[in-house]
Image (cartoon, grey):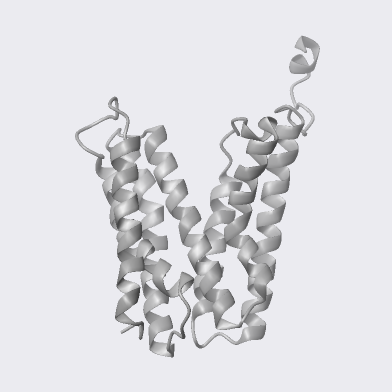
Amino acid sequence: MLARPTSHVLLAVAPYVALGALLLLRLPPSHPGPGLGPGNRLTLARATLVLPLAAPAFMPGVVTGTGYWWLVVLSAIALVLDALDGPLARRTETVSAFGARFDMELDAFLLVALSVLLWRTGKAGSWVLLIGGLRYAFVLGGILWPRLRGELPPRRRRKVICAVQGIVLVVGLAPVILPALATVIAALALLLLVYSFAVDTWWLAAGGISLRPSRNPSNVDAA
């Protein structure tokens, strides 16, 4: 259905093997609940939709119009499930740092695959790869500059902008979307992503000091 050579099955299977190995190695003994827990099981189910995107994204060849529609459908379902695993974990009281990291890494992989796929359509230039690559550039920056490895405070901004990236890339992949429109919406999404990373980088570089003045005068006096 995706009009891909049979040999690409190996590339589709390899991520599953790698994911299984990582889960066995990284799942902490103190993880709440039996096994992975409901939220992580949903994330794992989402991975079954996301990981097959590696084959058409990272191996040469041409995906047909029908193939792109299948990619759009699989990616759209994965994006919808992404909004459900967190609430499920909270409802079942199985929230964990492992689950948050699992979800984040899968989201990062999805953005890489989608940005490569959009680039391969020719609807956007190679700059669109930054949508999937900025997060890994940030991680690399943390290796070179330890201050960037600091813990960031929770912000809804990150979740919203990350969701926007996925939605824009999936919409851009749809065969009915013209290259000009795909380029514009992807460029706007990238600007939002750059802004988000810039804010977090600035915050960490400043030593975790809030850039906004305190609204409570007592806080200033105490400082």
In the rendered image, residue 92, in percent from the top left (x then y), is placed at 27, 37
Location of residue 17 (image quadrant): bottom left
Task: Tell me if residue 58 comes above or below residue 134 in the rendering.
Answer: below
Q: Percent x, y for residue 24?
A: 28, 39
Instruction: Give the mark count.
Output: 0
Answer with the quarter of the image where residue 47 lies. Answer: bottom left
**Residue 197 or 27: which is nearer the viewer?**
27
Image point 59% across, 30% down: which residue? Answer: 151
The residue that appears at 34% across and 51% down in the rendered structure is 18
Can I make out residue 104 in this image?
yes
Whether 215 is drawn above or below 16: the answer is above
Residue drawn at x 60%, y 43% is 139
Residue at point 29%, 79% (across, down): 6
Q: Is residue 56 above or below residue 142?
A: below
Residue situated in front as seen by the camera: 26 or 6? 6
> In the displayed image of the protein, which residue is found farthest to the left?
34
Is any part of residue 46 visible from this angle? no
Residue 218 percent coordinates (x, y) = 75, 14
- The image position of residue 157, as x and y in percent, is 60, 48
Which image quarter holds the N terminus? bottom left
Q: Looking at the image, is 154 positioned above or below residue 122? A: above
Closer to the camera, 61 or 195?
A: 61
Q: Can you say which quadrant of the picture contains the C terminus?
A: top right
In the depicted view, which residue is nearer to us: 102 or 159?
102
